[in-house]
Amino acid sequence: MADKKADLAGPGIGTYEEVEKVLPTDYRSLLDPKETQLALAKLKRFIEDGMCKALNLFDVEVPLIVDVESGVNDYLDRDGSRTPIQFHINNDYNKNPIDAQVVQAATKWKRVALKQFNCKVGEGIITDMRAVRKDYFLDHDHSAYVDQWDWERVMTADQRNLDFLKDIVTKEWKVLTDAEDMIQSEFPKLKDPKYPSLPKELVFLHAEEILDMFPDLPRKQRETQILQKYPAVFIIGIGWTLRDGYPHEMRAADYDDWVTPTVTKNGQLMHGLNGDILVWNHVTKRRHELTSMGIRVTKETLKQQLEATGQMDFLKLPYHQAIMNDQIPLSIGGGIGQARTTMAILKKAHLGEVSVTVWPKILKDICAKKNIFVLE
């Protein structure tokens, strides 16, 4: 069980010796740096436009910083291990100061924004979100700088079920596979038999089912094994404590609904209305997460999840009060990692090839030895 506890500690590999082993030894980017930039622009435009059309979304502005007192920042997990950057704005000679935080994701802000922009049922928003997550170990697919298409859509109470979740996920997946088809037609050299394309079909599995298949493996190894059979999966039920006593992965208690019972299989009740899309990365030969999404909490499930995680004090915050008082709509939403997704579609070995951020010298030196062009 100790390995499983360690597996929940957070993303990343853990040491640069391990990173060096993961990064390929025979790597040659299929696109040069200039071609990569041209392809990125086309891909990002296609995916954002495709999401708007598929899910009836429209573009809105999104904050980089938020007021601490609002409670809308994303804490990513529920153990307090990933904290946002916080700073004091000494406004008006400290007569009207603001304590602000850099966002880690716009998950909760988006739900509030649905009301601000007067979104109706079946209508939603999408953002070109930028964030900073300072507590990640910086490796080939985790960076301190995060770019996401964060989206959110208004839904009804009777849509809060797995069928609706799967329908939305399937539409999102088609946008991503269509984007790959488009960019391969624009840059034919990306269609390389060494690196197979994303499968058209996405397989849905509950975290509990995957645990049943591989009961002796920790979470990341279970994901690695299932991706050998299905190279693209949506894992349902992220955050609920599984029968081995651990969640598949930590999930914050105040946005995705991971407590709602959804289905019984072989006499076993499973929970959760959320999940992650993972694919097999044929360049790094590792699991690769593209997006997290889910149906959001109601006032009842918010209270259950905060109680389960010992965070009932959150209920006093404006965001949580808005949910408890039915002041913001029921919704479904998610975040698609821009660099993660374009890295996979463009067959890159490292996030630094598709986004510009800071990396430690040791990692840049490893990349240089392996012919990986990291943007400065």
Image (spheres, rainbow, N blue to C red):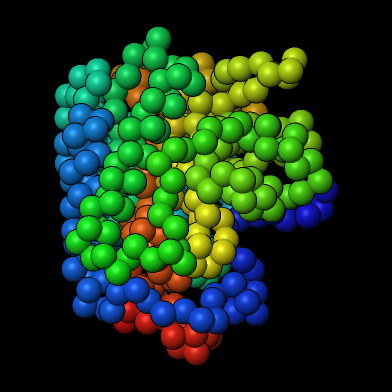
Residue 243 visible here: yes
Does residue 236 lie above or below 192 as drawn? above
The image shows a total of numbered marks equal to 0
* Left or right: where 195 falls relative to 47: right
Report the residue at 51% width, 81% height from top.
26
Q: Give x and y (percent) for residue 362.
A: 53, 86
Front residue of 318/353: it is: 353
Report the residue at 41% width, 20% height from top.
164
Residue 106 visible here: no
Does residue 70 lie above or below 105 as drawn? above
Image quadrant in which you'd find residue 127: top left
* Left or right: where 138 falls relative to 338: right
* Left or right: where 256 falls relative to 244: left
Front residue of 80/375: it is: 375
Q: Give x and y (percent) for residue 227.
A: 59, 49
Image quadrant in which you'd find residue 23: bottom right
Front residue of 92/335: it is: 335
* Left or right: where 80 falls relative to 361: right
Report the residue at 53% width, 67% height from top.
284
Image quadrant in which you'd find residue 245: top right
Report the residue at 37% width, 76% height from top.
29
Q: Quadrant of the C terminus?
A: bottom left
Q: Give x and y (percent) for residue 223.
A: 63, 48
Front residue of 105/309: it is: 105
Q: Residue furthest top?
A: 158
Q: Residue furthest front?
A: 193
Q: Give x and y (percent) for residue 24.
A: 54, 76
